Image (spheres, rainbow, N blue to C red):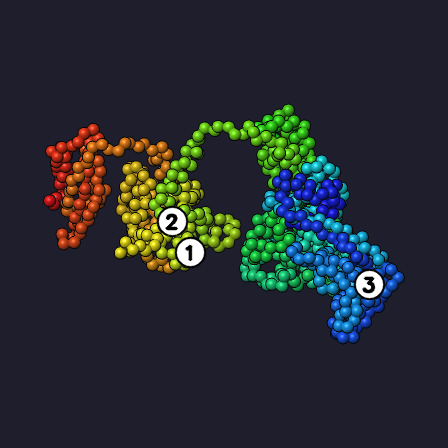
Amino acid sequence: MKFSVNWVREFVDLPNNAEEIAELLTRAGVETENIETRGAKIEKVIVSQITASSRHPNADRLTVCEVDDGSGTKRQIVCGATNYKVGDNVPLALPGAVLPSRREAEAGFQIKVTKMRGVESEGMLCSAIELGLGEDAAGLLILPPEAKAGAPISDLFPSDTILDVEITPNRGDLLSHFGLAREIAALTEKKLKAPPAEEKIDIKQSGVSISALRECPFFSARKIDDVKVKPSPDWLRAKVESVGIRSINNIVDISNFVMLEFGQPTHAFDADKLKGEINVRLARDDEKFLALDGKTYSLTPENLVIADEERAVGIGGVMGGEETSVTESTRNVLLEAAYFLPTSIRRTARNLNLPSEASYRFERGVDPGMILRASQRATELIREIANGNPAKEIAATGKIPMNPRDVSLNYEKCDQILGLSIKPKTVDEILARFGLTKAKTTKTRSTWKIPSYRRDLQRDVDLIEEVVRAYGIDKISGTDRSRFTPSSPADHSHDLESSLRNRLVAHGLSEVRTSKLIPRSAIVLDENAISLCNPLNEDHVALRPTLLAGLLGVLNRNVRASVERVAIFELGRVFIPPAGKEERHLGLLLRGNATSAPHWRLREKHELDFFDLKGVIESLMIPALSFQRSEHPNFTLYARIWSGNQDIGFAAQLPAERTSTIGAVRAVLFAELHVDLVLATQDSARTFHEIEKFPAITRDIAMIVPEKISHAEILRVIEEPREPLLESVQLFDLFTEEIGEARKSLAYRLTYRDRSRTLTSEEVTAAHAKIRERLQRKLGAELRE
């Protein structure tokens, strides 16, 4: 947000150097992004009075003006503007004046005596934009009648500095010049000047009503009659335009001025265009609304509207309507000031893509204590500037939200967290400067009442943060913070996670991160997913119970980009229905070619299949890993994954009808494992043994078995009971043709070794024979020579 230093200075004494102000705020956590100097401190630009005007003899769109520059000599100026009249005071740039450029990289424009269409011009009459005083380029800048001809323009428009400050979302109290001044006063121990007075205003309970009390706890409206809508006086126009808001008319500018001054948005309706009483309600389904930006919006019951008896006249907290806007013909206005639920305003502004200065403040939370003060301030300005006649009473309904609950602070905890000792008296003084009031105190603890504008202060650590912001974070020593910290279970878990990621990356997979929220379309497949009460949009309506939806979204984007091979993984949290229990899961997704690019040595392309997925899972080094074939309605091929007797996840192939919707015509393999269960079986420290000194002996076993017998069952028979000399077992052949139905031929290579000596052929033959006999006896295997 942009702040005028001159404006802030009206509320608090500031350092003369803007850099000091920026440094003060930045050290307190309110970052200043840019400093810009403005004003009309331009040499040879003075006040002049137009004494005569006539048509240019050679140009229809130009006029020839005679002006008094205060020197007693009349000057002839050729002018292209039409918004002036004889007798007006306007800025005059004399020959030799250099006007500021609109672009930083360009030099200023120098005024010279010149001829325009054959008529000599001895200077230039200026608009606001040409002097850097505003954005209006439509005509000359009309100066006050009391301005003295010949006076430097800088006397009317003193130089100003604009601070562009980055306000964090939790600090809505800083979105006004008074709010920033209040912050600076607390940081510098200065006293606030001219705070807004709290005047007693008579309230009546008729004329307005609220049907949506949750979205709008409090609403007020004040009738002001006999207003004269016209251009704003120069001081008001200069103030709103100094921070980038375009001047409209005196009524609208007053509303914007009060918002910029005190942070409370207000809105003025043309009272004569309203029909009956005002009601704050939720919009009807597909209700149409013509906004001030000239666009018609289709509303939903999630949107809050201000309505009369016939239609919506404003989107609550966001924007008013075109049909009831204040124009030059307006004679009576209704001034609105209210409190709206921040989440409701944020949702409406996002859904309609309709951000505004008002919604920017309401969605961050305005100060409930400023609502009626801002209404009174705007009313007084309308009475002074527009000659309005305000009603003695203000129509209001609902209740102003209560102040935040009290927060307790332990002085010893404050010292422990900050790493330095601050006297309790100093802590109390700092918190009091920030507007907190002590409710009760003991030697070690105090309880504080939180002001209505600081709803971000909810815990003791929030108060400690305020203390260190004012005390000076630079006073916290960093020399004694580098201490040895023993490894914790969290560190150990992190190391295991890193090792897990490294193995997957080494296996050719890429890590992705997807949202924990899934779109409405994904709920069709995950009917038990936990829905959000207030989703921001249709793409984020529920908590994900599985990683599949997010990984399919990544696959979809890669397929549309014509990527041949997709091998990805994600390690993230899921939310298991119905209670929403959080678990960390690992998701794996494979699709496409086994290699990312063709190679001259690879004559045939190999498509990634279920065994590639199985190989990735096996690379995770999960002990006692096994796969159990099962059935699942959402998958073509499905197997549960076990570590010993513990179920840790599943591996599957997605059906073609599901993957074809995203253009993935090849097989898509997916696995999901419970990460905490996987990591519990591992250890970050690995044991290595020396290279074997004695040779191994290999023997093969070829057999025909029923097709229903799995590879895992065969391995179990070979390895149990464990043969001491057997080192490893590897399947190297599978054959199913020409051996009869429901049968298959498999061949295994068994490796035998003893680490202390060289084995004899007789020893290996005896051990091998025992295994062959078990296969025949337990599985009915038909052994082949």
> Taking 127 as reference, is 629 above or below it?
above
- The answer to whether 663 appears left or right of 775 in the picture is right
The residue tagged 2 is 568
Name the residue at the right extreme: 72
Q: Which mark is residue 88?
A: 3
Mark 1 falls on what kind of element? helix
The residue tagged 1 is 557
How far is the residue under mark 2 from the one under mark 3?
Answer: 72 Å
Q: Amino acid at mark 3?
A: Asp
Q: Amino acid at mark 2?
A: Ile
- The answer to whether 340 appears left or right of 556 in the picture is right
**Quarter placement of the C terminus:** top left
Any part of residue 492 in sight: yes
Residue shown at 45%/47% (left/top)? 516
Q: Residues within 10 Å of mark 2 (few under 14, many from 20)?
A: many
How far is the residue under mark 1 from the one under mark 3?
Answer: 64 Å
